[in-house]
Amino acid sequence: LSCITARINLYSNLPFTIPSVSGSDSPNILSSLKTLTLDGYFSFDELHHAARDFGNRYQFLPSAILRPKSVSDIATTIKHILQLGPSSKLTIAARGHGHSLQGQAQAHGGVVINMESLQEPKMQVHTGELPYVDVSGGELWINILHESLKYGLAPKSWTDYLHLTVGGTLSNAGISGQAFRHGPQISNVYQLEVVTGKGEVVSCSEKQNADLFHGVLGGLGQFGIIARARIALEPAPKMVKWIRVLYSDFSMFTRDQEYLISAENTFDYIEGFVIINRTGLLNNWRSFFNPQDPLKASQFKSDGRTLFCLEMTKNFNPDETDVMNQEVESLLSQLNYIPSTLFASEVSYVEFLDRVHMSEIKLRSKGLWEVPHPWLNLLIPRSRIHDFAEEVFGKILTDTSNGPVLIYPLHRSKWDSRTSTVIPNEDIFYLVAFLSSAVPSSTGTDGLEHILTQNKRILDFCETARLGIKQYLPHYTTQEEWRAHFGPRWETFVQRKSAYDPLAILAPGQKIFRKAI
Ligand code: FAD
């Protein structure tokens, strides 16, 4: 293993605002890209778009952007770069929708592959007993939703926001309020077509090339580019009942969340969020949730208390309303929320799933979407969630006005330990997501520096108190940190890198391996 790690040049103790493999190759090497016979094309100007992401903090300019029209365009490009050998520093980053937070889809001086250009063959829904949809790795989840709904079907597991690509979320995990029952999105894929770092196009599944299949899922783009994916579908409901209830007692809140994720015939989606030091509560909530009783909702004041909001939905079709309401009543009767704080709404399935996009439109119109997003996503073992809450919600975080703080439990049994994603080693763990937006150039509590300092305090506490957390959408700057992140799985990760991308050409923006030159 040590010779593998030496060969693929692990990053070591470097800060990554300035990458050590940097700068463009000679004009000859770049113009050699123009000689490739492709269905799509390269562009060498207007590169700035590929040097940005949702995080709005890291900007690394590539030398070229490939807009592939076919899978073979990707394979041809990778093979060509391999043939250039050590004379070239070129690396390759697949870029999905560029909604990474710290430059993960960027390639400094390298080639960015604009995966959304890859649209052939067309998306195809297969009905039957085990329905599925075949899609391009560059397809947006929102498009998959609309296409599969034409057949009365939809994917089972989602992210909160659907304007992300299949390749982008499957390279991480893809988690939302359905993951407690269906597992993350990486647990709902039947098959992939991958272009490896050797330029080979490989079909893989649980049964065929299983090591590559599992490696790529949650693999942070390190082992291959997901060109196609076969995603599991289920019958789609027309409507959802969307409910929010509040707690002031954290133990009651988590007890109820944990009860619900294991209960029979439970809700279809279960999440939650924290509200610290806010008034005028409902108007500021993150999504387009319009309670049926807006008067009651507007009268509720948090009075600066720390509150915990449990959010859940029940799917239904219009002819099942009565049964659905009975089931909801029965589930709610088991819970211990503050009685006057039950807020409910009924919306279409699409409106519910696409809820964050509604907020995006609103934020964009105010110029508040393209600001720095110093997000921090943590997976916390159930046994330590109270220690975490006491310190972080009780002391470190003085308010939640910089953005929502999500918190909800997940079952480890719904995750496949053969994939590359690492999660805490307990049957139940919590996702806690600090989804902060910073006000550009502010030096106050809504500024980037303040939020980054707060994030660091949270991470330092987790480390000192040995909570056994894992970062989701991880970002590290040293080899030791990556090694610690993967723990016992590090050796497998390195071996897979050596097998599928031996020259470390792929996904340099993750800063895990450095191209061998
Ligand atoms: P990109 O940022 O383009 O790429 C991410 C990484 O994957 C890069 O390393 C890139 O090189 C690699 N990559 C991209 N495409 C491919 C491919 N085809 N093959 C191989 N590697 C590839 N995540 C959740 O799990 N749950 C959520 O609820 C959630 N909500 C979000 C809400 C918002 C508003 C945002 C901005 C992000 C959210 N995320 C969530 C995080 C999101 O899933 C990841 O950031 C994801 O990587 C973004 O997808 P993308 O298509 O923009 O990927």
Image: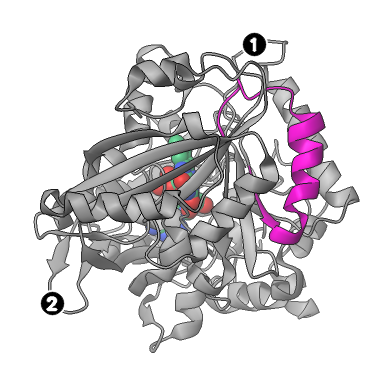
Colour mode of the rendering: one colour
Kind of residue at disc 2 = Gly
User: Relative to 30, is 283 above or below?
Assistant: above
Q: Residue 128 shows which numbered tag?
A: 2
Q: Earlier in the sequence, mark 1 or mark 2?
A: 2
Q: Is residue 379 left or right of residue 202?
A: right
Query: Where on the picture, by quarter, is residue 413?
Result: bottom right
- Most extreme residue toward the bottom is 207
Residue 418: mark in rendering: none
Closest to the observer, 308 or 89? 308
Could you tell me which secondary element the residue under label 2 belongs to? loop
Q: Secondary structure at mark 1?
A: loop
To which residue does mark 1 refer? 441
306 vs 340, nearest the viewer:
340
Dot 1 amino acid type: Ser
- Mark 1 CB lies closer than 8 A to ligand 1: no
Q: Is residue 491 left or right of residue 70?
A: right
Q: Nearer the viewer, mark 1 or mark 2?
A: 2
Indicate the position of residue 387 as horizontal and vertical percent values. 81, 48
- Does the magenta run of residues contain 117? no
Residue 351 percent across, percent down from the top left = 25, 37
Q: Residues within 10 Å of mark 2 (few under 14, many from 20)?
A: few
Q: Residue at x 67, y 28 (%)?
A: 306
Quick check: is 400 in the magenta stretch? yes
- Please give the name of the residue rendered at 44% of the width and 22% of the height, measured from the top-left corner: 369
Label 2, ligand 1: CB separation under 8 Å: no
Does residue 309 appear in the picture of this structure?
A: yes
Count the labels in the image: 2
Q: Which residues are magenta?
A: 377-405
C-alpha separation, residue under disc 1 versus residue under disc 2: 55 Å
Quadrant location, the N terminus: bottom right
The answer to whether residue 353 is visible is no
